[in-house]
């Protein structure tokens, strides 16, 4: 995820922060610390707020944890398809949780959102059966589109299904926009 997510920023963070800090050349512990420092500074680059620092810290801890797991268990390629799928799900859970801190104006609001996401979901309007069906369909489509990267080649769709699935997701986003106005997140910087 982190190699493909915002490639220009990731490359800049790697080239101008991570590598000058020593990268992975000074042992495992120092590698974990360098990853954490790089991502915390990447979070602060987005804004001088503790929520951005928390977002960067979550990403740094996830990167360090990923390195640690790979050092213990071997590379992602040697993992079973189920293990890769589990890793992908954990990564997405961490990323989605981190984005709450990225977008929330305060910790109080971030924790309210997380409470509604993971603990007390009652009262959220998107728990409509149609919305749940759309979310499940989107996750299935995403897994199908990413099947080759997850090691699930036998599930990989043909070249016609991928564009149809992506067009369907695009249409759903346009057909069911959120209520109210949500400005583009980077307009706040």
Image: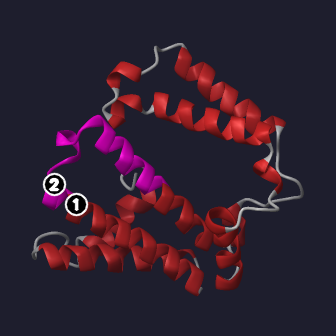
Tag 2 and tag 1, C-beta contact below 8 Å: yes
Residue holding disc 1? 69
Q: Which residue is mark 2?
A: 73
Please identify the quarter of the rendering in which residue 33 is found: bottom left
Task: Judge from the rendering whether residue 181 lies leftward or rightward of residue 105; answer left or right.
Answer: right
Classify 42 as above or below 184.
below
Secondary structure mostly seen in magenta is helix
Q: Is residue 8 left or right of residue 179?
A: left
Image location (x, y in percent) of residue 168: 68, 26
Give residue 55's mark. Answer: none
Q: Is residue 69 above or below residue 20?
A: above
Residue 74 visible in image: yes
Residue at 47% of width from left, 34% of height from top?
A: 143
Q: Is residue 5 visible?
A: no
- Quarter residue 117 falls in: bottom right
Q: Position of residue 27 (x, y in %)?
A: 10, 75
Extent of the magenta region: 70-92
The x, y position of residue 120, in whole percent, is: 70, 67
Residue 110's spot in the image, x, y percent? 66, 76
Whether residue 91 appears in magenta in the rendering, the answer is yes
User: The residue tagged with tag 2: helix, strand or loop?
Assistant: helix
Q: Quadrant of residue 68?
A: bottom left
Label 1 CA crowd tier, 10 Å (few <14, some 14–19, many 20+): few
């Amino acid at each position: 995820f982190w190699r493909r997510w915002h490639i220009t920023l990731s490359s800049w963070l790697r080239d101008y922060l991570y590598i000058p800090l020593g990268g992975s050349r000074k042992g495992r512990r120092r590698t974990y610390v360098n990853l954490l420092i790089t991502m915390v500074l990447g979070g602060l680059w987005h804004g001088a707020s503790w929520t951005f620092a928390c977002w960067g810290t979550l990403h740094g801890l996830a990167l360090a944890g990923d390195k640690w797991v790979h050092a213990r268990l071997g590379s992602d390629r040697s993992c079973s398809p189920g293990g890769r799928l589990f890793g992908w799900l954990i990564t997405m859970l961490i990323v989605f949780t981190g984005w709450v801190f990225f977008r929330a104006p305060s910790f109080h609001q971030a924790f309210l959102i997380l409470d509604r996401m993971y603990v007390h979901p009652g009262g959220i309007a998107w728990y409509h059966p149609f919305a749940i069906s759309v979310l499940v369909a989107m996750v299935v489509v995403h897994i199908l589109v990413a099947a080759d990267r997850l090691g699930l080649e036998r599930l990989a769709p043909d070249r016609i299904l991928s564009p149809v699935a992506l067009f369907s997701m695009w249409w759903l986003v346009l057909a069911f926009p959120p209520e109210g106005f949500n400005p583009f997140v980077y307009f706040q910087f």
